[in-house]
Image: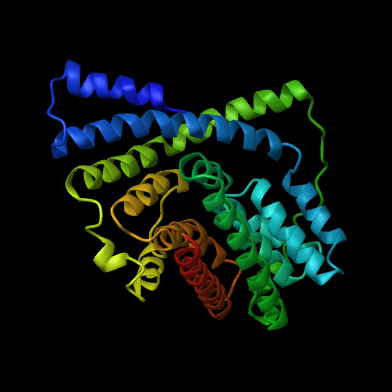
Amino acid sequence: MFGWWQYIVDLLVYDLAGMERGTPVAAAIDFFLFDTVKILLLLIVIIFAITFIRTFFPPERTRRILAAKKEGLWGAHVAAALLGIVTPFCSCSAVPLFIGFVEAGIPLGVTFSYLIAAPMVNEVALGMLYGMFGFKVALIYLVSGEVIAIVSGIIIGRLGLEKWVEECVYTIKVGAQEVTVPTFRERISESYQFTLQVLGKIWLYVLIGIGIGALMHGWIPAGALAQYAGRDNPFAVLVAVVAGVPLYANAAGVIPLVAELSRAGVAMGTALAFMMAVTALSIPEMILLRRVLKPKLLAIFVAIVSLGIIMTGYLFNTLL
């Protein structure tokens, strides 16, 4: 699909600039130019399409859907995990959404199924994985992320951990908000404006991620990392998750690293486990969730999700 751009980049780097093929500098520059345009174009299309779909699922509507399904345990968890893919979510929205769900009477476990699925199954990452690695990788990422969210929510719900929710959650009232139905023109306009806003916020992360990938592409030969993070290392996934948990990066910025780690010999499951840990257990989200969760519940949340990601990493390494 991007063969035309690769031809232009090769022409610029090797013919016009006169750089020698096979040298680390030339390979890094070629990679950076090609991936920057490819990833930014993918981002524009994916973010616009996802934002348009999101206009049909405002937070208040999400809360009402889950409240209506709270009696059916499995159905509620599945609905929460699926809604987590398409509804608006960022670290700053975690606390008000959590309070709103609790106020609506949505069980704690169902609430966590949503809170886990929303950042973990990142719709931008899903679209980019499909564009860069194909349907199989994207599907396994989607299914595994949803399963982690559903199972984790059920476990948390069965443990009866409501006593470890901060008391203020039960006293704050957010109230129901009126849901207005935008016109088609308004949906297009909102999608356009939001796409520009998101690109304005993440472009630097994307360039940093591509830049690191370019350095790896130029100076780290394929297979060099396999001895440390390949399928033969039983601790590779565990190390990747532990390394990813304390980091904070946008999913779009991590995708180029996933691609380059895979090229350099890191098993796909290990690379994706690292990405899922970064997106699902970011420091900003944990800090904000601490406002509504006591330390014990927050620790259980991190432990369960981390375990799920580790298992998913090993599953990827087995299937791919």
In the displayed orientation, state which residue is furthest to the top.
16
Is residue 273 or residue 113 the one in the foreground?
273
Q: Is residue 195 above or below residue 144?
A: above
For residue 295, say whether it is visible.
yes
Which quarter of the picture shows residue 117? bottom right
Q: Is residue 15 above or below residue 198?
A: above
Q: Is residue 240 above or below residue 11?
A: below
Question: Could you tell me which residue is drawn at 39 percent across and 51 percent down?
Answer: 258
Q: Is residue 13 left or right of residue 53?
A: left
- x, y percentage for residue 5? 37, 23
For residue 105, say whether it is visible.
no
Q: Is residue 291 left or right of residue 214?
A: right
Question: Could you tell me which residue is drawn at 67 percent across and 46 percent down?
Answer: 86
Q: Is residue 295 left or right of residue 18?
A: right
Question: Could you tell me which residue is drawn at 25 percent across and 57 percent down?
Answer: 223
Is residue 32 or residue 163 the one in the foreground?
32
In the displayed orientation, state which residue is furthest to the front.
319
Question: Could you tell me which residue is drawn at 50 percent across and 46 percent down?
Answer: 129
Is residue 34 or residue 82 the one in the foreground?
34
- x, y percentage for residue 169? 69, 67
How is colour applied across the structure in the image? rainbow
